[in-house]
Image: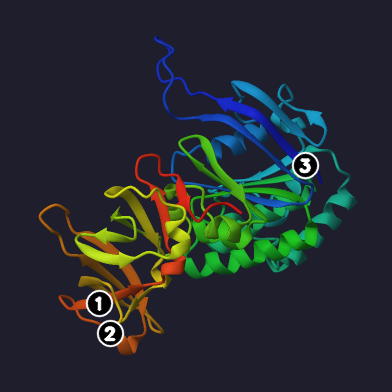
């Protein structure tokens, strides 16, 4: 095991060899340290730079500036094959002409581990991943989930200092992805190797990570424990990215005591009022998660019109619109309800919001105004 430390890592991509013009892609000023044995997840939308960071750690791409350490060793100038990391790719990258056993053994053979030790390690890893009955098969004879286990097994067999996983579950169907995600967590608890995992799936990030690094446009937005980031997002981007379904964002006018949303008055808790500028007419983006929105015909404050109803068995996912006014376009809001409350498309309902669970974001910068960091 080894810690991984990035200090002000920047990677610029060149768009044109003729003009040497750099694009907005890449990463800038990336700094964090993953402790020995930790499981960290890099998460963010497509193009945010998470795979670039992983490939830079692996040595597959070179940083434009900054320092990268694996353990206490500066590895900027050390080639990928000498960094003692194992990477699992999205496409598995198995050798189709080799059996499962040969794929598992390949990395050990390249490192000239003796045949007896190689066989013992292959058998141990195969049993750990429940693929010991597949050792004589070739990748083309395996299911997607089995191929994924072989790819993980090949990395585990090497016993590297660091695991790097680049969206390894994205090619699996939903049920298999859930099962494999649980298996990954169990495996990490068992082998304890420092792991950095890249995904755009916020469910994977929340369930797997000791710590999450949220990225957007090549820069770190926030680092923290999953539940901390969920409860105290640093900005609107993070708040809407983490959570399924995502947080609702409603444009609201603060009048000093309450919010006006498309002409409708939504009360404001005293704690939230203490964090808002007492300027009449100040615009905020008001955030509320779907689980904090309820159908409350007698005590609600927000009238909406139902647009989509999606029965999900034990609950119903509902999408609705806050009606437009002369000055404000209609605004969308999503929530869940019990099947016994299931509305119909076109119904007008009164919704209640959990006022103690509201978020407020600066309209211009997107920064979180409330709740503030503890």
Note whether residue 288 is visible.
Answer: yes
- Residue 331 occupies quadrant: bottom left
Check contact, mark 1 vs mark 2: CB within 8 A: yes
Element at label 3:
loop
* Res 147 visible: no
The residue indicated by pointer 2 is 298
The label nearer to you, 3 versus 1, is 1
- Asked whether, in this view, residue 48 is left or right of residue 346, the answer is right
Q: Please determine whether, in this image, residue 360 is positioned above or below residue 34.
A: below
Side of 101 relative to 120 (left or right): left
Image quadrant assignment for residue 190: bottom right
Position in image of residue 297 (x %, y %)? 26, 83
Q: Which residue is found at the position 73% from the left and 66% from the top? A: 132
Q: Is residue 173 left or right of residue 268?
A: right
**Along the line of sight, the residue nearer the viewer: 226 or 348:** 348
Q: Which mark is residue 321?
A: none
Separation of residues labelled 2 and 3 (CA atoms): 56 Å
Picture residue at 18% right of the left edge, 59% below the top: 330
The label number, if any, that marks residue 3 in the structure image: 3
Q: Position of residue 95 (x, y in %)?
A: 61, 46
Secondary-structure class at tag 2: loop
Residue at 60% in and 58% down:
228
Decide which of tag 2 and tag 3 comes sooner along the chain.
3
Q: Label 1: which residue?
A: 350
């Amino acid at each position: 095991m080894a810690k991984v430390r990035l200090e002000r890592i920047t990677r610029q991509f060149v768009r044109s060899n003729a003009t040497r013009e750099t694009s907005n892609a890449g990463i800038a000023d990336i700094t964090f340290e993953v402790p020995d044995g930790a499981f960290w997840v890099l998460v963010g939308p497509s193009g945010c730079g998470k795979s670039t960071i992983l490939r830079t750690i692996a040595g597959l791409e070179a940083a434009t500036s900054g320092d990268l350490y694996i353990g206490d060793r500066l590895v900027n100038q050390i080639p990928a094959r000498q960094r003692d990391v194992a990477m699992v790719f999205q496409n598995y990258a198995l050798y189709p002409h080799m059996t499962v056993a040969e794929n598992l053994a390949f990395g050990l053979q390249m490192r000239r581990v003796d045949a007896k030790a190689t066989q013992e390690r292959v058998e141990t890893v195969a049993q750990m991943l429940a693929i010991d009955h597949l050792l004589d098969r070739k990748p083309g004879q395996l299911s997607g989930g089995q191929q994924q286990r072989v790819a993980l097994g090949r990395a585990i067999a090497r016993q590297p200092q660091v695991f790097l996983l680049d969206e390894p579950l994205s090619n699996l169907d939903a049920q298999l992805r859930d099962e494999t995600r649980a298996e990954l967590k169990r495996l990490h608890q068992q082998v304890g190797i420092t792991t950095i995992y890249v995904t755009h799936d916020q469910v994977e990030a929340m369930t797997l990570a000791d710590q999450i690094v949220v990225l957007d446009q090549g820069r770190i937005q926030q680092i923290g424990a999953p539940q901390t980031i969920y409860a105290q997002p640093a900005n609107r981007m993070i708040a809407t990215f983490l959570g399924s379904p995502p947080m609702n964002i409603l444009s609201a006018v603060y009048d000093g005591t309450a919010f006006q949303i498309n002409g409708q008055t939504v009360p404001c808790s005293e704690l939230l009022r203490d964090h808002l500028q007492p300027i009449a007419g100040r615009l905020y983006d008001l955030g509320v998660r779907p689980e904090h929105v309820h159908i409350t015909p007698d005590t609600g404050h927000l009238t909406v019109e139902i647009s989509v109803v999606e029965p999900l068995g034990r609950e119903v996912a509902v999408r609705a619109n806050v009606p437009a006014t002369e000055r404000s376009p209609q605004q969308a809001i999503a929530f869940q309800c019990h099947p016994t409350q299931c509305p119909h498309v076109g119904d007008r309902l009164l919704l209640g919001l959990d006022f103690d669970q509201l978020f407020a974001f600066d309209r211009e910068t997107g920064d979180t105004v409330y709740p503030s960091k503890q």
